[in-house]
Amino acid sequence: MSTPNVSGNFRTPAAVVFDMDGLLLDSERLARDTFIAACHEYGYQPDIAVYRRVVGSTYGATQVILREGYGPDFPFEPIYARWSERYDAHVHHLPVDKKAGVLEILETLTDAGVPLALATSTHRTNAQVKLKLADIGQRFTHLVCGGETQRGKPHPDPYLRACELLGESPARCWALEDSMNGTRAALAAGLTVFQIPDLVFPEEHERNLGQHLVHSLHDIRTLFLELKTRRNQP
């Protein structure tokens, strides 16, 4: 992975749409570990290769993926309930660690007057709690949360809705994602997509779908500042 070349066809964004879990907050490890613990409570040893496919997906998609991957006898409902209970016990009371560069990129974009939105598969109540505890919720003009569009990620609906709320064309917006589900959603919606992989690195056939792979949010901030400087030069 490398920072995109500023000499390419990049422009400063009219707005930026962020994912949340795994991109802003280091919550995907917590989600994975509480899933494993919930499975163990029911005497089930999960195949993590199957679990990785649910990262960034909705409740409905998670149910389909786990049942297809683990078989029709997989006790999805009780495991999901216990998984949610364990996960929520943490995120409702304790701030989730922020990923590297979060405060810097949010401050830089806000200071530059770039509107920010969030497109997450997490339901609104949980998303708002996590953002509040992390003290970053005030940075976002709009939230598009799980269950609020006809289809969730990897479909484009959440990103199309975010751009609609921002009043901007997707072609003029950047999307920042970590997962393949989110990356596919943003690409399908027509945004310029920067992917910062978290738990799951894209397979070889997934690395050239049109997204730009970078190491961290620091790289995005560097690119934005370079583009801004170049734009202001006579």
Image (cartoon, rainbow, N blue to C red):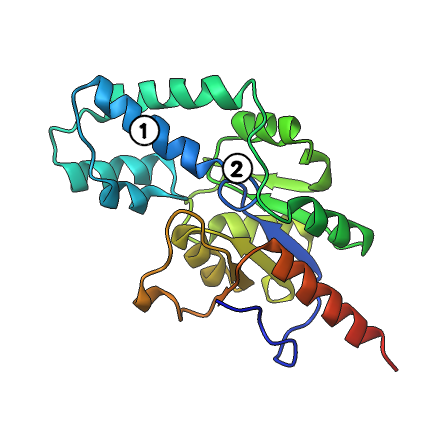
Query: What is the tally of numbered marks visible in this picture?
Result: 2
The amino acid type of the residue labelled 1 equals Phe
Q: Which mark is residue 198?
A: none
Nearer the observer: mark 1 or 2; the answer is: 1
The answer to whether 2 appears left or right of 104 in the picture is left
Q: Please give the name of the residue rendered at 60% of the width and 76% of the height, measured from the top-left corner.
A: 5
Q: Could you tell me if residue 155 is visible in this image?
A: yes
Q: Nearer the viewer, residue 147 or 47?
A: 47
Does 206 sit above or below residue 29? below
**Residue 171, horizontal then vertical, whole percent:** 60, 67
Q: Which quadrant of the structure image shows residue 132?
A: top right
Q: Work out whether mark 1 precedes mark 2 in sequence or the reverse, and give the earlier one.
A: 1
Using a 10 Å C-alpha cutoff, classify the residue at mark 2 as few (fewer than 14 neighbours), some (14 to 19) or many (20 or more).
many
Q: Could you tell me if residue 191 is visible in this image?
A: no
Label 1, secondary structure: give it: helix
The answer to whether 74 appears left or right of 139 in the picture is left
Q: Please give the name of the residue rendered at 28% of the width and 22% of the height, measured from the top-left corner.
A: 38
Q: Which quadrant of the structure image shows residue 32?
A: top left
**Residue 80, horizontal then vertical, whole percent:** 30, 24
The answer to whether 132 appears left or right of 32 in the picture is right
The amino acid type of the residue labelled 2 equals Cys
Q: Which residue is mark 2?
A: 145
Q: Please give the name of the residue rendered at 40% of the width and 69% of the height, measured from the top-left corner.
A: 209
Q: Which mark is residue 35?
A: 1
Q: Please give the name of the residue rendered at 36% of the width and 59% of the height, measured from the top-left corner.
A: 202
Farthest right residue in view: 234
Does 175 sit above or below residue 47? below
Does 157 sit above or below residue 124? below
Q: Nearer the viewer, residue 55 or 185?
A: 55
